[in-house]
Image: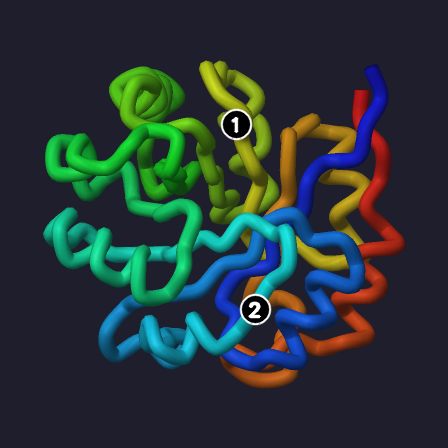
Amino acid sequence: MVKRPFLKVCGLTHASSLDCAIAIGAEYVGFRFYPGDIRSISAWQASKMPSGNAVRVGVFPSENAGHILTIVKDAALDMVQVEAMAGAEWVRHIESSRVVCSLRCGEGLSAEVLQRLIDDWQDICSLYRVELGSQSDAELLRKLRFPHSWMLAGAIDALNVELLVHSLSPDGVEVDVSIEQFPGLKDMQSLLKIGSAMPLRC
């Protein structure tokens, strides 16, 4: 079956960027809730940014599940994204259908260690996000097997998205800082180019 990977636009802080993401067909939109992070916004700010039918994802550091669920409610989020390396036990308080597990390829981790993380999270999440540290990590990524859908992240733009999708066959693609005018504000032309460059995959 041939289909287009889904698109997630993350690190949104401006309504204009969100509107453009929706206009080009982004199925997922992401908001960061990292205290002190330049792209972090409050639950109140996120709640004032409607997103149509797109899945709203909150990106969190390891934190108390109760606090995260409060933000999920206040910001009208559909899913939460957390780092696999932060540990999985505290996330078990959140429905697995609402959890995105985020991993980074490279950083000295072997395929065996990454696969173990993927397997450890399979009953806790429903979607994986995998960030490439560099193009050389692609070979490592090809060795991994995912029990759920996964999205590719990390320095993706209109110039490389087609090659990466054809090479790695992700179920989805995330774009973030690589298409910004300045932190949190996405470049409209770059978003439009991403939308038109997204290829079909087998």
Residue in front for this viewpoint, 164 or 170: 170
Residue in front for this viewpoint, 159 or 97: 97
Residue 122 to residue 137: above or below:
above
Residue 120 to residue 78: above or below:
above
Judge left or right: residue 44 versus residue 21: left
Disc 2 marks which amino acid? Pro
For numbered disc 1, what is the local secondary structure?
helix
In the image, farthest residue toward the bottom:
182
Mark 2 vs mark 1: in front: 2
Q: Residue placed at 60% from the left, 58% from the top?
A: 9
Q: Which residue is mark 2?
A: 50
Judge left or right: residue 68 versus residue 12: left
The answer to which quarter of the image holds residue 6 is top right
The location of residue 22, given as percent across then percent down, is: 71, 61
Q: Which residue is mark 1?
A: 141
The location of residue 43, given as percent across then percent down, is: 33, 71
Q: Residue placed at 56% from the left, 37% from the top?
A: 151
Q: CA distance from mark 2 to mark 1?
A: 34 Å
Does the image show residue 116? no
Q: Quadrant of the C terminus?
A: top right
Does the image show residue 122? yes
Judge left or right: residue 141 versus residue 195: left
Disc 1 marks which amino acid? Leu
